[in-house]
Image (spheres, rainbow, N blue to C red):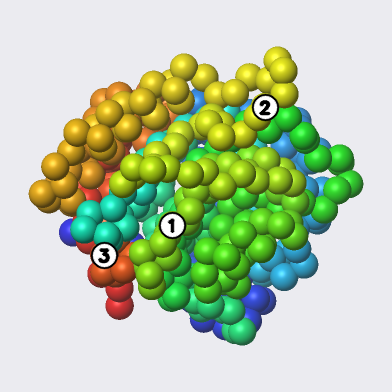
Amino acid sequence: MRGYQIQRFRGNGCEIGLYIGKQVKGRFKSIIDHFLKAMDRAYGLDFNRLGKEALAWLSRLPEEYQLEVESLAYGSAVKLEKIAQWLYCDRFISGGCSSFIAFVDGVAWVGRNFDHAGSCLWRNINIIEKEARIPAVIFGQEGALFSHTGFNYRKLWLHYNHLPVWDMPDSDEKTIPPFVFIRMALENCNSISEVEKLLQVTVRDGGMNLFVVDGKNNTHAVYECTRKGYIKRQSSKPYIAGSNHYTATTTPKGFKNGDRSSVSRLKRMEDLLSTMRMEDPYRDFIRVLSHPEVEQNLGASGTVYSNLACPSKSLYYYACNGFPAASKAAFEEVIFP
């Protein structure tokens, strides 16, 4: 039995939301409630703030995605406010996630541990084929329209790790959450240069350590993104890694740039990657992701899913049915219908 499930949705924006909603109808409210309780245990949710701010936040999304969320609410028979809270609560997390891009014989591999709350709730892969958009594949929870991780039919892989920011948005400013940016980039970008152009014309409401791999030509980029700006990181080594702090960006005096966990996870990844013989990329890279000083297990939160991918070879592995996922779940090849 597979640890993940794949679902495919086709149509215009209204239909995408409606079809996903119908797929989870009768279960969606329980899924959301379960996740909000997990978030509360892990991070301590301010439910008053959720109630006051979530719908206003939703109204600032691009209109095409607002329509999808509204259709999701209609199709699932779950109140729009409840779905807005489910999406909005992501801003309460303070850190987590470890990632690398490494080259073996000129071929790019990407690995990532996604750290969050809600173990075994992140077992879903949605294929979204929206009219007039590039089809996108996203990893996450059932019912998800957006994701922190995905790739498109142009062999473009994107994911991000959370970064703290110092330039918070005004209450009425039009911004895009990083997980919405991922979906937007996957559906509209054919190349790394087009992702960079999208960074230039959007304002996000959070920071991103953004990893991009183009499997068409084995090129890559890692961007440290604040709300309005970004720095493209450089590396002279056959790998580049990142966690939840800035390494190339000058931060303001007094700003807390990540924490000890972020620094130690990055160092351990770099140490492991630098000494690896790369004889068996699948085995070697899983060893990096599952290392106890890279993977996280904080009890109520930690590595809820892990990805290993080689976009140029169309190889995608997903570990999600165990906690912490990199060491306790099987890395299963994703076989698409």
Question: Which residue is under mark 3?
Answer: 315
In the depicted structure, whether residue 253 falls above or below residue 87: above
The residue sitting at 37% across, 36% down in the picture is 303
Most foreground residue, 137 or 123: 137
Label 3 neighbourhood size at 10 Å, few (<14), some (14-19), many (20+)? few
Most foreground residue, 267 or 331: 267
Question: Which residue is under mark 2?
Answer: 251
C-alpha distance separating marks 3 and 1: 16 Å
Mark 3 vs 2, N-terminal side: 2
Residue 199: image location, x then y, percent: 67, 56
Most foreground residue, 157 or 290: 157
Report helix, strand or loop for mark 1: strand
Task: Describe residue 157's horizontal placement relative to residue 178 as left or right.
Answer: left
Task: Describe residue 79's horizontal placement relative to residue 330 as left or right.
Answer: right
Residue 309 visible in the displayed image: no
Q: Foreground mark, 3 or 2?
A: 2
Label 1 neighbourhood size at 10 Å, few (<14), some (14-19), many (20+)? many
Residue 220, label in figure: 1
C-alpha distance separating marks 3 and 2: 37 Å
Residues marked 1 and 2 touching at CB (< 8 Å): no
C-alpha distance separating marks 1 and 2: 24 Å
In the depicted structure, whether residue 336 falls above or below residue 111: below
Q: Amino acid at mark 2?
A: Thr
Residue 216 visible in the displayed image: yes
